[in-house]
Amino acid sequence: MPPEISNSKSVVADEIRLKNYRSQLERRNELELQELEARHQEDLRRISGTQGTQIHDLQNSYDVRISQEAEALEQKLNTIRSTNKERIELENQNSEEEYTKLKLAHDKKVEEFKRNSEQQLESLKRQLQASSEALHEQARKSSRRDKEVLEK
């Protein structure tokens, strides 16, 4: 066999071997690529699930936190309302006491004024009675004098 034929058989055999090797590499690469894609998809599903769980947990945490803050604010509001109600009741009580004191003081002044007025009125009545009696006595004396003068 000529060297060219054996060389060409060798080249053909090398080409066939290279094609086979290339096919095997392509299949292996294809399988690895499919495995990587499958792992990638699985990782994406896992990460997506984890993210969903984390988002759900965060929402629950925020809801709990908001609920706690709302309860704290409501408790504070109730405390303020209670304090203000007590303060208003105390103010009302103090106002009632002050009103009662002022009314008593006013009633005392009115009573004292009435008493003083009655005393002044009584004093004026006595003075009027005394001056009426004095005038009456004077009129009698004058009438007696006039009678005496006329009799004389």
Image (cartoon, rainbow, N blue to C red):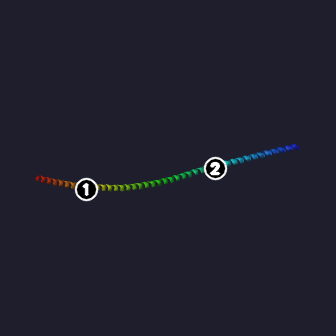
Residue in the foreground of this view, choosing between 100 and 35: 100
Residue 75 on image: x %, y %: 49, 54
**Residue at 82 percent of width and 45 percent of height:** 14
Residue in the foreground of this view, choosing between 100 and 56: 100
Contact flag, marks 2 and 1 (Cβ < 8 Å): no
Image quadrant where residue 7 sits? top right
Lower position in the chain sequence, tag 2 or tag 1: 2
Residue in the foreground of this view, choosing between 117 and 40: 117
Q: Describe the element under mark 2 as helix, strand or loop.
A: helix
Residue type of the residue flagged with mark 2: Ile
**Residue at 66 percent of width and 49 percent of height:** 43
**Residue at 69 percent of width and 48 percent of height:** 36
| Residue 1 appears in the figure | no
Query: In the image, which disc is placed on residue 68?
Result: none
Query: In the image, which disc is placed on residue 123?
Result: 1
Q: Marks 2 and 1: which is nearer the front?
A: 1
User: Is 119 placed above or below 13 here?
Assistant: below
Residue in the foreground of this view, choosing between 2 and 80: 80
| Total numbered labels | 2
Neighbour class for label 2 at 10 Å: few (<14), some, many (≥20)? few
| 146 to the left or right of 68 | left
Residue 148 on image: x %, y %: 12, 54
Residue type of the residue flagged with mark 1: Ser
**Residue at 61 percent of width and 50 percent of height:** 51
**Residue under circle 2?**
47
Image quadrant where residue 135 sits? bottom left
